[in-house]
Image (spheres, rainbow, N blue to C red):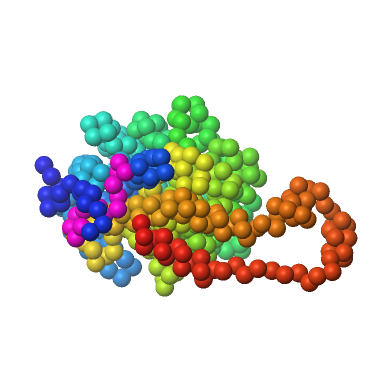
Amino acid sequence: MSLFPNVPKIQYEGRGSRNPFAFKHYNAQEVVLGKTMEQHLRFAVAYWHTFNANGTDPFGAGTAVRSWDSLSPLDKSKVRVEANFELLEKLNVPFYAFHDADIAPEGATLAETNKNIDVIVAKLKEFQQSTGKKLLWNTANLFTNPRYVHGASTSSNAEVFAYSAATIKKMLEVGKELGAENYVFWGGREGYESLLNTDMGLELDNLARMLRMAVDYAKEIGFGAQFLIEPKPKEPTKHQYDFDAATTLAFLHKYGLKDHFKLNIEANHATLAGHTFEHELRVARLNGVLGSIDANQGDYLLGWDTDEFPTDLYSTTLAMFEILKNEGGIGKGGVNFDAKVRRASFEDEDLFLAHIAGMDSFAHGLKAAAKLIEDNVLDGIVEERYASYREGIGAEIVAGKHTLKSLEAYALGQQQPIRNRSARLEQIRQTLNEVITGV
Ligand code: XUL
Ligand code: CO
């Protein structure tokens, strides 16, 4: 039985197509720089936004109209499994991602919750086997329930730390059972509102303790997923500990955890931190920790995490540029649509149209980024801009042959005033426009 009878299987029809239920750029088997689009992009559907979100906002009730609305909590969870795999099939998306709370209702006790999870995990496993779809990552929701009011791993209440540990343990077991390729830690309420009542040192030590326990347990049970930390600067807490890629890297270094984690970089989190998506990806890439991405976009007029489907081609192009430049590309990670349809896009069809928009925008970005690389556009510009470091004094500096003293002697000896060259940014942006519109 189909849950989305009005939606056909989405096919690639190419650029000129006016069919809204068709891809204009995403052609799964098309080869770009030696790999298929499917291999480059490894798309994933986010369970929470697609099957659980209902359009609620602080001023109004849910607007989404879903066929499972009237069911009991556990029956709803079961139907959502079917909806998930039908949607993945129709969109030709190979992966999905979830939190424990997305897939099964919370019970009155931890044991009851775990029982509910087991029921749904068995169903997910069956569907994975019959469809060949895979779990990109799973995670524990340690932020929705009121027990996490002061945080989870960084809660002021040790009982909450213990409960969080039990939840993470369960979700590592679930990840193993379902063959998850990654496991994500987003520090939902791991942060604080005021230093007046916060022991920041203890909270950070505890966060590291929890992550260490997770690393140890995964090893104990033979769960080989790549662990990912997802930075975010604000929302829900004013000060989030994993503010951005650089802050998270410093934390991992301090606690000796760097070898066990990569980063899951989310576009809207990057912009909330005052960075671009590509900045965060570059920082992760240069440090060898670019693991996966949460694909979405924010709204520059709004200061919160709007989680819109990605349609900004500048952003998808520059993001894909970083991914293509990363050793091994996206690796075990993927392009996970951590994105929700707008509140006014409340029909089932919107779930498909939104993913088509996101997938096409990333496929377009992939083609444009590949063109930038093939034609040596940005690398050529950068190479020329830094040419002074490949000869003369610059080459000597890079080779480590100088000190402040020797450079002072050099500078004193120069008779001509220093001449800089224009950075030509406007012209470069025009070139980028040409590349994006040309592919
Ligand atoms: C929240 C967010 C989360 C994580 C997983 O902003 O991005 O959904 O991706 O917990
Ligand atoms: Co996310």
Q: Is residue 329 above or below residue 391?
A: above
Numbered range of the magenta stretch: 17-30
In-image side of 223 versus 261 (left or right) = left
Q: Residue at left 35%, top 52%?
A: 363
Q: Which is more toward the observer, 371 or 267?
A: 371
Q: Residue at left 12%, top 53%?
A: 6
Whether residue 61 is visible here, answered yes or no, is no
Q: Is residue 27 above or below residue 420?
A: above
Q: Is residue 28 magenta?
A: yes
Predominant secondary structure, magenta span? loop
In-image side of 249 versus 402 (left or right) = left
Q: Is residue 325 magenta?
A: no
User: How far across and down, in percent of the image, does residue 231 sit?
Assistant: 50, 53
User: How far across and down, in percent of the image, does residue 27 sit?
Assistant: 28, 47
Q: Residue at left 32%, top 43%?
A: 30
User: How far across and down, in percent of the image, does residue 214 sit?
Assistant: 51, 36
Q: Residue at left 22%, top 31%?
A: 130
